[in-house]
Amino acid sequence: MPDRRDFMAAAAGIAVAGTFTRTAVAQDDSANNGRKNPIALSTYSLWRFKNDEMKDVRKCIDIAARMGFDGVELLLYQLEQNDLLSNSTLLSIKRQAFTLGLPLCGMSTHQGFVSPDKEQRRRNIDLTIGQIELCYKLGIPTMRVNTGRWRSIGFNELMANKGIEPPTKGYTDEDAFPWVIDSLVECEKAARKRGVVMGLENHWGLGRTAKGVLRIVDAIDSPWLQVTADTGNFLEDQYSQFEMLMPKTVFVQAKTYFGGGEWYELDIDYKRIAGMLRKHNYRGWISLEFEGKEDYRTAVPKSLKLLRDALG
């Protein structure tokens, strides 16, 4: 029977093995042989804030299974708006995904820390910590977080203005970066405790640019706050900005626009995106966010094929 020293030595070996980074794995040329990125369906692709037929994520999960996706990303707002947050409903969603062989691989959440109001920021910190607890309950390993935005203009005007909005009178973006960083420091403590990786998305506000996202992530410098990279949210220099995020990306959201975009439409070269993923040895999830006008019955399978062909 091994003694305590043998056990401690073995445990140390496991700990060292667990510290391997993406870069270390990349040094083994055989690491990616035959391996493809798993592709999830975001429930947003079907509901999109307006499709009553798809308001229940359980129906979305069934469709994801039938269409051949590898997993599901939940949109928290969809759960909130359609009264799906009871404990029994959440556990039924978890069981359903498990029995279909579809991991619940991510959750997209909303919060906002771009406000001079300290109490409002505190409310959003508490909201985000609650979202982390929800991911922990559902066994979801990562959740999308946002910086928030000034909300000085409406969303349609924001889209027309390519995501640029004026700050609240008397303030600048430079005032807002410390608000966001300090708030996410508080959230990081909860994420670390529960083992849920937050991914700060390039999603308007201070996260409109790769530089803004990385300024926040680098300031906090924690493995529990990394990046969720969205292929459709850079409206200038999309490829160079996307690649800037790659070294710290833990989750990718992939936009498609069959039938034309709701607010705008980008021509995204997914073979080029796939090359960036390989270059940076990104081995994680790709989540489809369909944002076109075509019927989901044809557009979502076409989107899945597009991603599989490019990533394969």
Image: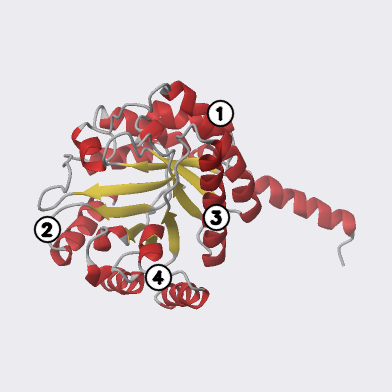
Above or below residue 307? Residue 211 is: above
Q: Earlier in the sequence, mark 1 or mark 4?
A: 4
Image location (x, y in percent) of residue 288: 29, 54
Q: Label 4 amino acid?
A: Asp
Measure the C-alpha gap from mark 4 to mark 3.
Answer: 19 Å
Q: Residues within 10 Å of mark 4 (few under 14, many from 20)?
A: few
Q: Secondary structure at mark 2?
A: loop
Q: Label 2 amino acid?
A: Glu
Q: Label 3 amino acid?
A: Ile
Q: Which residue is mark 3?
A: 132
Q: Earlier in the sequence, mark 2 or mark 4?
A: 4
Q: Secondary structure at mark 4?
A: loop
Residue 83 - label? 4
278 and 127: which one is in front? 127
Above or below residue 39? Residue 159 is: above
Q: Secondary structure at mark 3?
A: helix
Image location (x, y in percent) of residue 265: 16, 42
Q: Which residue is mark 1?
A: 219
Q: Earlier in the sequence, mark 2 or mark 1?
A: 1
Q: At 43% from the left edge and 56% from the top edge, which residue is drawn?
A: 107
- Image quadrant in which you'd find residue 206: top left
Measure the C-alpha gap from mark 1 to mark 3.
Answer: 21 Å
Q: Secondary structure at mark 1?
A: helix
Q: Which residue is mark 2?
A: 294
Q: Earlier in the sequence, mark 4 or mark 3?
A: 4
